[in-house]
Amino acid sequence: ARRKTAEDEAKRLAAEEETRKAAEEEEAKRKAPGEDTKIVAAEEGQKKAAEEDEARRKTAEEEARKLGGAIPALDGRRTVSAQDFLGKANEQNVTRPQVKAEVQHQQCVLHKDPSPGFVRVGSFEIREQQIADPKLIGQDLDQAVKNFQGHHQLSEQLAVRLLLGCDLDQELAAKRLAGILDWRRQNQLDELRTRLLAELRAFGESGPFPSYHKEVSELVVVNPCVLTCTDGSPVTIWHVGTAKSAAAGKAVSSHLSKWSECVYEYVDIWISQQTDQTRRMCGHVQIFDLSDVGLWQASSSALIDKLKLLLGAGGNYMEAVSHIFVINSSSAFSIGWKLVKGLVSPRTASKINVSNAIPEALTTLLGPSSAEMLHDLLKNPRWSAHVRRPQTLAVV
């Protein structure tokens, strides 16, 4: 009887211990943040960052109204230059240290001769090949930029990019601007830009992958902003030989378009702020690797249509591409390019380099470190290669 009583007591204590442990585990799970909690926290962080951006924008708008000037946007896309803004501030003896420092930098740049191979348009250095007619360089061109900028309430940089992209035709540039603004409204690009800036704050050494990036990799491997040039410009690699004709039917067109918007808006954030800081018009470098491209890929209209969607958003960012390198091309492709080259404008042709290997011009542009990484990425294409982040970007 005593033995049985002892066994029953032991079982009771064991049961109580199990109940206690189960309760502790349940409490620990309740306190530990799950994936849903983390997602909610991330969304709250993005929302808070967006609210902070909006608060700063409103403050800037209020200051601008007091000074009678234009409204400076946070990303510098639709605003007059800091120099014009400070001019209004100086008239009323208003101290703005951060704007003053920027204008002093611009004034210093304006008094320097442009670097070899560059000309000055407004306060920016531009590659000579980007000017359709070199005879137009001078005060008349600067005045045309200023007039276009003031009439459409743009940043100086955006005005220059639009005019260069339209061969200095102001009427055509105005039409392109209207179309671009309409496209941005329809596709909510300003909201996307806010999200990308918030993600840049949240990420550490690398930048965020674009939306649907893994899905895109099932169609073709692309490494957006995976390298940088010696001047800090972003470099994207298109591994054209990895394109799969069989995957074209499964790829969702709207997802490909969203991926394209994310990539090119991210690039625009990068090059616009780098250009503002260096006062040299920088651009996006794109590498198209034609290794292992077969006749089946080249003749698949469904695949080509889907690849066009991945490039589609780029047409809404004027003068954003500085160089295009088509590498490891076949002899037939190289010969074909030589024939076509004479049919395009010299300004466009100056951006494109076609080679059956990796040209020295590309190696020089990249520098030793990025050139070495390029060889590795070409040898082993992978969608998961890290997205670089701008070195000069101010996201706080």
Image: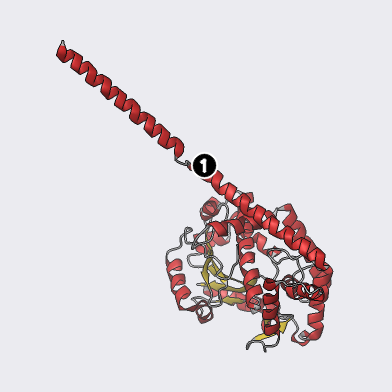
Residue sitting nearer the eye, 187 or 50: 50
Residue sitting nearer the eye, 29 or 384: 29
Q: In the image, what residue type sits under mark 1?
A: Thr
Q: Residues within 10 Å of mark 1 (few under 14, many from 20)?
A: few
Please give the name of the residue rendered at 34% of the width and 28% of the height, measured from the top-left corner: 20
Residue sitting nearer the eye, 379 or 394: 394
Position in image of residue 383 (x %, y %): 48, 58
Position in image of residue 63 (x %, y %): 77, 64
Position in image of residue 9 (x %, y %): 23, 18
Q: Does the rendering let one see residue 166? A: no
In this rendering, the count of numbered labels is: 1
Quarter of the view holding residue 317: bottom right
Vertical arrangement, residue 149 with respect to residue 220, above or below: below
Quarter of the view holding residue 50: bottom right
Q: Label 1 belongs to which residue?
A: 37
Quadrant position of the N terminus in the picture: top left
Q: Is residue 24 left or right of residue 324?
A: left
Q: Does the rendering let one see residue 58? A: yes
Q: Is residue 388 left or right of residue 14?
A: right
Quadrant position of the C terminus in the picture: bottom right
Q: Circle 1 — which element?
A: helix
Please give the name of the residue rendered at 77% of the width and 70% of the height, measured from the top-left corner: 80
Vertical arrangement, residue 32 with respect to residue 23, above or below: below
Position in image of residue 326 (x %, y %): 56, 72
Residue sitting nearer the eye, 32 or 154: 32
Q: How is the image coloured?
A: secondary structure
